[in-house]
Amino acid sequence: MSPLRAICPAKVNLGLHVVGKRRDGYHEIVTIFQAIDLYDVLDGEDAEALTLEVSNPSIPAGESNLVVKAARLLQARCEPARVRGARLRLDKAIPAGAGLGGGSSDAAGALMLLNELWDLHLDSATVEGFAAELGSDVPFFLFGGTALGTGRGATIEPLPPMADRVVLLGSPPFGLSTPEVYRALEAPLTADGADVTVPRLFVKFAKGNDFALARNDLEAVAFRSRGELAVFRDAVSRSGAEVALVSGSGSTVFGLFRTGTDVISRAEGLRGEFPGWTVRVCQTVASGVRIVPAVE
Ligand code: C5P
């Protein structure tokens, strides 16, 4: 099989409501995921052994990397006659610990790439099951576009694509740890006793591009540990964003703008005000991970 490439997008959460604590220790959430055009690129070709090389030396390339975990999961669960090794190379553009789902998207990319490279012929339900085992955000990237995430975030219902928007991303020079942010959340109701009226309304409104109820329940935790995130979010709100929120468990703050807004000059202004932050201007996209032939 010739070398393949997985193009792995980032996401933002257009609101994240925590509705309760589950018996398995995870939190029950209602969120809308939105894919954006910031991409990691994973290349893979046949090889005897499984190896991973990562462009960014600060990201571990060993067994703890979700790409390697995805490959090991396939090796353990698929027909032994089919699974092999692979030479994998990951070119990172999505910052880590940023709430943009980079590691999760890479894991979805590895599952899809190796399914083809190794001719596994796994059906989509099986790939989705493996994705959910690898992490709560991984299944979304098999769909991409705009999608509702419920349960621990791994139950995905694709939604009609949102109207095209420009997304301004502000990533501070530090990441936040998802387990730590969830741990610091004030103990919510158990999932059984939770009231889902507001999250349901949030989804209903958001499907009509009305983000009045878009909030992120993890934001307060992120703001408590890093006050500058709230300062940045307020600056994005003031610059005319329809929604300005922390994405996922942070550390990225994003603003959603109607196309045609002069986001480039607003981004320039924010770069001046917040030295050390990386401010990017992206677009919403309708796809998830895509597999294409690798180009040399
Ligand atoms: O699923 P994933 O491995 O990405 O989750 C990382 C950690 O974040 C979990 O171990 C858990 O502590 C926390 N988490 C949670 N509720 C969720 C998703 C993640 O408590 N819905």
Image (spheres, rainbow, N blue to C red):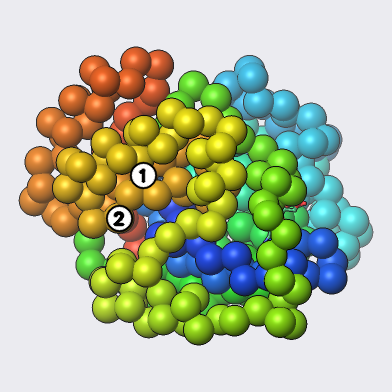
Residue identifier under label 1? 254
Residue 163 point in image, percent of width and height: 23, 67
* Residue 111 percent across, percent down from the top left: 67, 56
Q: Nearer the viewer, residue 41 or 235?
A: 235
Residue 231 visible, this orientation: yes
Is 167 located above or below residue 210 in the figure? Answer: above
Say whether disc 2 or disc 1 marks the residue closer to the N-terminus: 2
Closer-to-camera residue (232/149)? 232
Q: Nearer the viewer, residue 71 or 164?
A: 164
Dot 1 alpha-carbon crowd within 10 angstroms: few under 14, some 14 to 19, many 20 or more: many
Is residue 204 depicted above or below 46 in this figure? below
Q: Nearer the viewer, residue 110 or 64?
A: 64
Q: At x 78% / y 46%, what residue is drawn?
A: 69
Q: Is residue 206 left or right of residue 62?
A: left
Q: Secondary structure at mark 2?
A: strand
> Where, by quadrant of the figure, is residue 120 drawn?
bottom right
Disc 2 residue crowd, few under 14, some 14–19, many 20+, Cα 10 Å: many
Amino acid type of the residue that numbered disc 2 sits on in the rendered structure: Val
Callouts 2 and 1 close, C-beta under 8 Å: yes
Residue 43 left/right relative to 190: left
Q: Where's residue 230, x and y in %?
A: 41, 37
Instruction: Determine the quadrant in which ligand 1 lies.
Output: bottom right
- The alpha-carbon separation of the residues under discs 2 and 1 comes to 8 Å
Q: Which mark is residue 243?
A: 2
At label 1, the amino acid type is Phe
The local secondary structure at tag 1 comes to: strand
Q: Residue at (74%, 82%) from the top-left corner?
A: 192
